[in-house]
Image (cartoon, coloured by chain):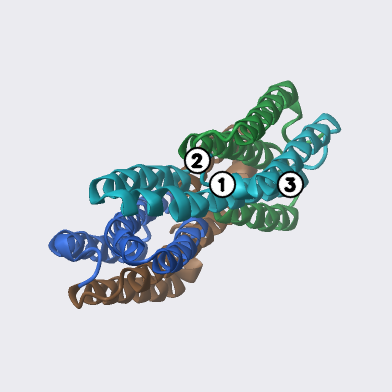
Chain colours: A blue, B brown, C cyan, D green
Amino acid sequence: MAGYSGSKDDYLKRLRRVEGQVRGIARMVDEDTYCIDVLTQVAAVTKALQAVSLGLVEDHLGHCVVHAAQSSDEEGQEKVREAADAIARLVRS
Amino acid sequence: MAGYSGSKDDYLKRLRRVEGQVRGIARMVDEDTYCIDVLTQVAAVTKALQAVSLGLVEDHLGHCVVHAAQSSDEEGQEKVREAADAIARLVRS
Amino acid sequence: MAGYSGSKDDYLKRLRRVEGQVRGIARMVDEDTYCIDVLTQVAAVTKALQAVSLGLVEDHLGHCVVHAAQSSDEEGQEKVREAADAIARLVRS
Amino acid sequence: MAGYSGSKDDYLKRLRRVEGQVRGIARMVDEDTYCIDVLTQVAAVTKALQAVSLGLVEDHLGHCVVHAAQSSDEEGQEKVREAADAIARLVRS
């Protein structure tokens, strides 16, 4: 079980949509679509992936971090440390 | 012809790799992989897409914007306006 | 007491440095410094502020969220919800 | 003369406002304001700085890059290269 397991189907649906959008961008590039229109589509996919990340972060905090904190202070702090690193990678990506 | 047409094959290769990575993330979710490991992969894909965007912006400036500027001041300014909007969407995505 | 109170002096020192950097950028603009050099400085300040945010998020998770989770499941979830919204604003800023 | 010189007063006004906002955040920290409220303010300042950057990029493209392109293809490409690097720093900050 992962923190997001309760919404697994929703994440899978969103990821399949992203996969289709990336394939659509490749088709646009293949057909020499105007740069700005390609950029608009890439920005839309980036935003969709970001939303997936934010959902995963919230699920992780609400399950894994909360449970760790309830198990012991030390486990809670360890999970917080790890989550904070993941959030930093997200903010910088 | 688009601004990126000279590097079309390179962009297509990168987009196909991104598509495969997104499929890999769906597989990870399907197998209940630990949240943090999924997040790390999503951040990697977001970074790859961002690199594609930055390449497209540079190709667009170096071809479409430069040519427009050489054709007339007015056309140059119009292309700059449009490029600036695309850059803003990129920064905010 | 806030989640960051243990590192208050460090945050105050960093914020004072940021304040000085912003004043430095205003001086650069006033002296018509080359655009790219001004942009490099603005990016440095943005990065510094982002680091402050990431520190505050980690302190908040490690104190306020952990304590709420230990107090009750409901309080934990409420704090997680609020933290997730703040992280989303951070990622999108 | 820099690309933004025509809007210098506007930039100076915005930077002075940002400086005041940073000072306000330091005050909030000094008074142990709730973490989430501090984070909201830091996100607002980051957004304001980002808007300054996007304005500077557009001014730079519309003046320095357009003029360089009209002077020679080589100068145009050189300025585009430099601008693309600055945009990448902005996207990654």
Image-based side of D23 in relation to B53, left or right: right
Per the image, the residue denoted by label 2 is D35
Q: Residue at x 64, y 50 (%)?
A: C7
Q: Is residue C22 above or below residue B6?
A: above
What is the crowding at mark 3: few (fewer than 14 residues within 10 Å), some, or many (at least 20)?
some
What is the crowding at mark 1: few (fewer than 14 residues within 10 Å), some, or many (at least 20)?
many
Q: Amino acid at mark 1?
A: Tyr
User: Where residue C83 sits: x, y (%)?
Assistant: 39, 46
Of D32 and B3, nearer the camera is D32
Dots 1, 2 in contact, CB < 8 A: yes
Image-based side of B50 in relation to D32, left or right: left
Quarter the N terminus of chain A occupies: bottom left
Disc 1 from disc 3: Cα separation:
27 Å
Dots 2, 3 in contact, CB < 8 A: no
- Give the chain of mark 1: C
Q: Amino acid at mark 3?
A: Gln
- Give the chain of mark 3: C
Disc nearest the viewer among 1 and 3: 1
Q: Residue at x 83, y 33 (%)?
A: C27
Q: Toward which corner of the image does residue A6 lie, by quadrant?
A: bottom left
Of B65 and D2, nearer the camera is D2
Q: Which mark is residue C41?
A: 3
SS category of the residue bearing label 1: loop
Q: Residue at x 65, y 57 (%)?
A: D85
Disc nearest the viewer among 2 and 3: 2
Q: Residue at x 29, y 43 (%)?
A: C78
Disc 1 from disc 2: Cα separation:
7 Å
Residues behind callouts 1 and 2 on a single chain: no
SS category of the residue bearing label 2: helix
Per the image, the residue denoted by label 1 is C4
State the count of labels.
Answer: 3
Image-based side of A4 in relation to D91, left or right: left
